[in-house]
Image: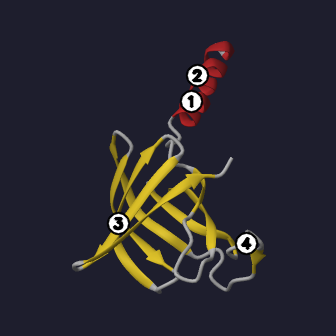
Amino acid sequence: MRHIGLAAAGLILLSGASMADPVFGTWRTEAGDGGNFAHVSIAECGGMICGTLGTAFDRNGNPVPSDKLGKRLIWDMSPEGGGKYSGGKIWAPDRDKTYSSKMELSGDALRVSGCVGPICRGQTWTRVK
């Protein structure tokens, strides 16, 4: 009986690891209006997908201090399947605007786009290895 319990516990742990969404990880943004870019950490939060702003960099790739580090950048994103995500919001720190957002994952590229009314923006982020 003990072996069955251990096997069941092992399967539960393995199934949790295999269910990690492929979008989870650290992503490098494109440069914003000021030339700076950042790393964004995407993970599960409350059953949805969210992202927080990690390290910020200047146009030369040097880390820069920012009061925005650790802020939530993406929230309420849900997977649709096939590498597509929708229903979320994204905050653009370079313009301090929040957009209705969607994302599409293709290998190590993540297309992130969003709109406020008729005004839309988008970037393609690359996975940080």
Q: Nearer the viewer, mark 4 or mark 2?
A: 4
Q: Which residue in the protein does label 1 denote?
A: 12
Mark 4 → mark 2, Cα distance in angstroms? 51 Å
The amino acid sitting under disc 1 is Ile
Which residue is the extreme one toward the right?
62
Q: Position of residue 107 (x, y in %)?
A: 50, 40
Mark 1 → mark 2, Cα distance in angstroms? 6 Å
Going from N to C along the chain, the mark reached first, 1 or 3, is: 1
Going from N to C along the chain, the mark reached first, 3 or 4, is: 4
- Determine whether label 3 and label 4 are within 8 Å by CB: no
Residue drawn at point x = 45 percent, y = 76 percent: 91
Residue drawn at point x = 55 percent, y = 49 percent: 24
Above or below residue 72? Residue 39 is above
Q: Which residue in the protein does label 2 denote?
A: 8
Q: Which residue in the protein does label 4 denote?
A: 60
Q: Position of residue 126 (x, y in %)?
A: 56, 53
